[in-house]
Image: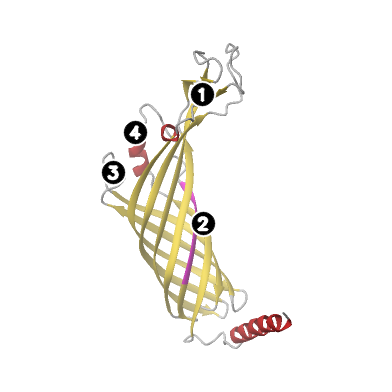
Amino acid sequence: MTKKLLSVVLGAGLLFNLFAEIKIDDPDRISGSGYFEVGVTHLNLDPMEKIVKEFDGKVFDFDNNAFVSFGMAGYVGQKRNGLRAGLGLWGGYNSTFSNEWRSVAQNNVAVNSEASLDSVIKLHMGFLHGGFLVEKSFLIKPRMNIYTGGMIGGGVMMALAEFMPANNAFRDVDDSDYDDDDYYYDDDNDNDNLKMALATYWAFDVHAGATYTFTRWLHLGLDFSTLFQYSSSGFGNRSSSILTANPGIRLRFIFGTSV
């Protein structure tokens, strides 16, 4: 046990010593990094608006098109002022609600009850794609870099409609038979209450930003990006092709020696 512990400590020490020997002004050295990022992407929701026409008479609020986005990638390349390439995975999520409508509630005891409740559709919207990443870095100060790059790949866009009761603060006082314990939204059949639409797309991304180096292996970056999504088939027969440009801003946490 002691030998194993010493081996782990010695191996970790040699690894950190290897990083410590890399000079900050050695831009031609080939190294690697990985990063995790969070941000906001303003997604063009026109394709989503077209497919929700399937729900006749239901109006959705698409004013908020800011998607919480995330991403992770790894790449290899020159340490500073050089070219790097790698692979990554990115995605985002947002949701919106339809207008409410009255529907007949289901009763475990009295199935013929005329009690009703407010119903609503929650539309879950998301996108996920992976691709090949290429970037060029420029050293402007000992701890400051700027970079620009692009990504090409493919992914899927999702719209999941969830039929659910509206959580209203007010109830109808004339529904004397109504009881929260007796009535529930009809969820016996998941296919009736969950409907999904999927669209595959080609993804293209261009971005530019800057990084600040805290240590030789920890860096913080901020970039502005535009994600282009293209799909010839869209969401299927009830939609047209998709071609959108989606701007965003991202905060990047970088671990490694290539920035």
Disc assigned to residue 162? none
Q: Closer to the observer: label 3 or label 4?
A: 3
Secondary structure under the numbered disc 1 in the rendered image: strand
Label 1 and label 2: CA atoms lie apart by 35 Å
Mark earlier in primary sequence (2, 4): 2
Look at the image and say whether residue 252 sits in the magenta stretch: no
Mark 3 crowdedness (10 Å alpha carbons): few <14, some 14-19, many ≥20 = few
Q: What x and y, as percent, mark residue 26? A: 52, 87
Q: Quadrant of the N terminus?
A: bottom right
Q: What x and y, as percent, mark residue 110? A: 54, 14
Q: Residue at left 57%, top 77%?
A: 143
Residue extending farthest front? 1
Q: Closer to the observer: label 3 or label 2?
A: 3
Total marks shown come to: 4
Q: Residue at left 59%, top 21%?
A: 182
Mark earlier in primary sequence (4, 1): 4
Mark earlier in primary sequence (3, 2): 2
Label 1 and label 3: CA atoms lie apart by 31 Å
The amino acid pointed to by label 3 is Gly
Image-based side of 12 in relation to 66, left or right: right
Q: Closer to the observer: label 1 or label 2?
A: 1
Mark 4 crowdedness (10 Å alpha carbons): few <14, some 14-19, many ≥20 = some
